[in-house]
Image (cartoon, helix red, strand yellow):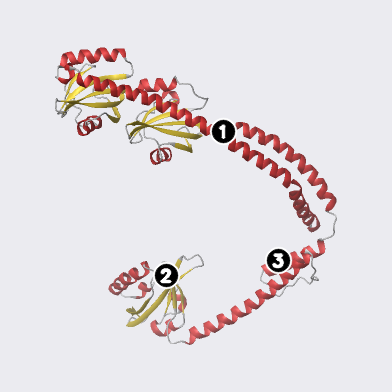
Amino acid sequence: MPSGRFASIRWRIFLIIIVSILPAAAFILYGAAERRQHEMEATAQQVSKLADVLADDIGHTVNETDTLLRVLSRLPEVAEDRGAACSALLSDIRLRDPRYANLGAAGASGRVFCSAQPLAGPVTAADRPYFIDAMKTGGFTAGEFQVGRITGLPVLVFGYPITDKDGRPQGAVFAALDLDWLNRHLAGLSHPPGTTLTLVDRSGTILARYPEGPEGKKWAGRTLPENLLAPVLSQPEGITEAKGLDGTVRLYAFSPVSVGSREILFVRAGVPKDAALSSARTGLLVNLAGLGASLVVGLSAALLLGHFFIMRRTNALTATARRIAVGDLSARTGLPYGEDELGRLARALDEMAAALEAGSRNLAESEERFRSLVESTSDWVWEVNEDGVYTYASPKVRDLLGYEPEEVIGKTPFDLMPPEEANRVAEIFGRVAARREPFASLENLNRHRDGRLVVLETSGVPFFDADGRFRGYRGI
């Protein structure tokens, strides 16, 4: 174990070292913070631009789908419910555009009468959100993630109403965007290493994601975790930092894909935070080498200055502080009071000890007066904690109920009452305690130790600790 002299010099050296390295430390921290901020801003701009570009790209597909459905809804093969001709037409269009898993049309009842993919039997779209919204709004609508009833593939379906000459919806034409195609499309885009690209619908279900999960695991159909979804839905455009689906912390930017003023999809692009800050981290390591040199210089200077004689006074201060800590409030340093730091500290320590000693005497006298008052009063003074358990009982309980104070501690007031009375009083006291209100003159029936019943009139007030937390009741 180090000697007292070694310990005291060590602390003085420690303080001198801190002073000597402050300029170097300030330089390193300021430079690292500046560089980190710059790189974070640059990365935020990069990932925000990436999200916007992807949102525009997806938005272009959505707009083309809108145009396609508007045109299809006016074709005679669709508008006049020509099933076979309509299916042949849509099949030819789908073969020319690999983005769509299927194209089709449904009547006012929701029955699909036309499909680019063969129908194995009757199929209805009546319960699909895209169909319901198209019939209700009379405009272009987007559904949510679903597995197609005709194709069996994960798709995002868009709809547009088929109207009569008066503009009344008579059904809807639909286009099912192939989410497998969308995944391939995301993988083919240019982006920095470690980037993730995610497209989600309004409910937070993943429609497509790059890269795919481990061993080709598909993300489509899974719900985005709350910590990743909440920022997107609360502020559809912006930057946030979060742990991704693969556990990597990234900077994320998100941007909506809208139809008119309605946001139907959300694009989310993420870049690993570690990669974004790698250059700043390298710079910090270089600067730490400079700090090491500063430490060597500071240590040398501290060793030279550490020869000043301070042990007697610091030992006296330490010994006095330890005596006070173990309760010896009569301890004093015995040092002369000077205007230097240690002299002022000795004065302050002695004055503190004197004040504590006086306060201790006053507290003891106050406690003695309180004890005498409590033991001489004709009332039973009590205290319960926040659980209603007695933590104090004055000796008067012996006269009133025949119990020693020590026997009452740990019980509740209701333990001393007949069951029916305990239930009645518990209900009254429960309402009062819930509001943290005082109560007065509450009559209650208690059972004396010898078995007879005793009627008491009880009053109490709540008490709280220094932080304002409820700690129980005190009363008589």
Please provide percent x and percent y for residue 155.
Answer: 31, 25
Which label number is shown at residue 274? 1
Q: Amino acid at mark 3?
A: Arg
Which label number is shown at residue 389? 2
Indicate whether 305 appears above or below 374.
above
Circle nearer the viewer, 1 or 3: 1
Please provide percent x and percent y for residue 177.
Answer: 31, 23
**Residue at screen point 75% across, 54% down:** 11
Label 1 to label 3, Cα distance in Å? 48 Å
Q: Is 377 or 342 nearer to us in this picture?
A: 342
Answer with the quarter of the image where residue 152 lies: top left
Q: Amino acid at mark 1?
A: Asp
Q: Is residue 327 visible?
A: yes
Answer with the quarter of the image where residue 197 lies: top left
Along the polypeptide, which appears first: circle 2 or circle 3?
3
Query: Circle 3 sits in a helix, a strand or a loop, which is it?
Result: helix
Q: Residues within 10 Å of mark 3 (few under 14, many from 20)?
A: few
